[in-house]
Amino acid sequence: MELNNIRVVLVNTSHPGNIGGVARAMMNMCLKHLYLVSPHRFPSEKARARASGAVGVLNNAVVVDSLAEAVADCGLVFGASARERSIDWPSVEPRQCAAQVAEASPGTPVALVFGNETAGLSNAELAHCNYLVHIPANPDYSSLNLAAAVQVVAYEMYLAWREAADSAAVPHTGTTASMAPEKGWASMADLEGFYTHLTETLTALEFYDPDNPRQLMHRLRRLFNRARLDRMEVNILRGILTAAQKAAASRNQASPARRGGQGADTV
């Protein structure tokens, strides 16, 4: 497990002081990489004041326009949320989250995503995540301050890193099979390309109606995000989609001729 592969992503943070509080929480737990998606105000002296010396995290923060951009190269993305969802999303607690990060392929970029202080993560934003992270708390008062939520999850990351470091220092015999796929996990950018291709193909097959989408693509995203595809699997699936598109195009070209022939025979 490498803490340097972990980034904290804050989406549409409204108060700059909370960004500073998050920077402090990250520095406490040896996390360095902060991504900010369209923050309302940044940089800000209020953020620097709340950071209490963790200005290095703020100075190196990456500001982007979209969550898709923030997690594009990540192989594993967790979205923190306290809200219940109309569609169940694969959910883990912070300790389980840290365990999965520890088991990820070496060098895999991992994102911990936290939404706006008021609304949290939208369903559209959660669609960019493999798992939802839920922090157990008082059911009558479960909403945590943004920096506190980051602190809880970051603490579990730090504990898992220490445990992994301690285990690595103990000599052992035997070998452990690597959990890393031969070609590596698919990044979120790979998956976004696949989802676009899937939408186009299902539309061409008349299985998906863009004018009446319901929750089809949202559910399919949940399915494939949960499956943790590797790059080879994405390539195979996209090959299947390309073949389906070609078959649909051939069928559509042949249909008028077939209908014309049948009509001539019945006259």
Image (cartoon, helix red, strand yellow):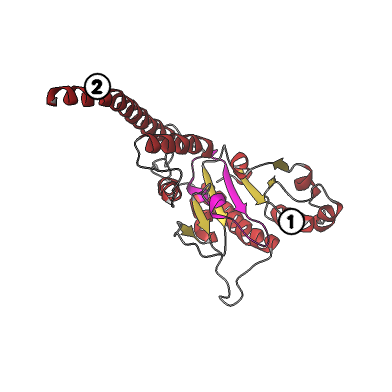
Q: Where is residue 17 in the image (x, y as percent from the top left)?
A: 79, 58
- Which one is earlier in the sequence, the residue at label 1 or at label 2? 1
Residue displayed at 49% across by 41% down: 105
- Camera-nearest label, 1 or 2: 2
Which residue is painted at 39% across and 41% down in the image? Answer: 177
Query: Which label was assigned to residue 14?
Result: 1
Q: Does residue 247 sit above or below 116 in this rendering?
A: above
Magenta span has 113? Answer: yes
Which quadrant holds the C terminus?
top left
Residue 233 lies, in percent from the top left, at: 38, 35
Name the residue type under label 2: Ala
SS for tag 2? helix
In the image, taking residue 146 as reference, residue 166 lies left or right, namely left
Distance in Å between CA atoms under marks 1 and 2: 60 Å
> How many residues crowd mark 1 within 10 Å: few (<14), some (14–19), many (20+)?
some
Where residue 76 appears, x then y in whole percent? 52, 45
Farthest front residue in view: 267
User: Is 17 drawn above or below residue 193 in the view shown?
Assistant: below
Residue at 55% from the left image edge and 69% from the top image edge: 136
Disc 1 residue type (three-letter): Ser
Looking at the image, can residue 166 be seen? no
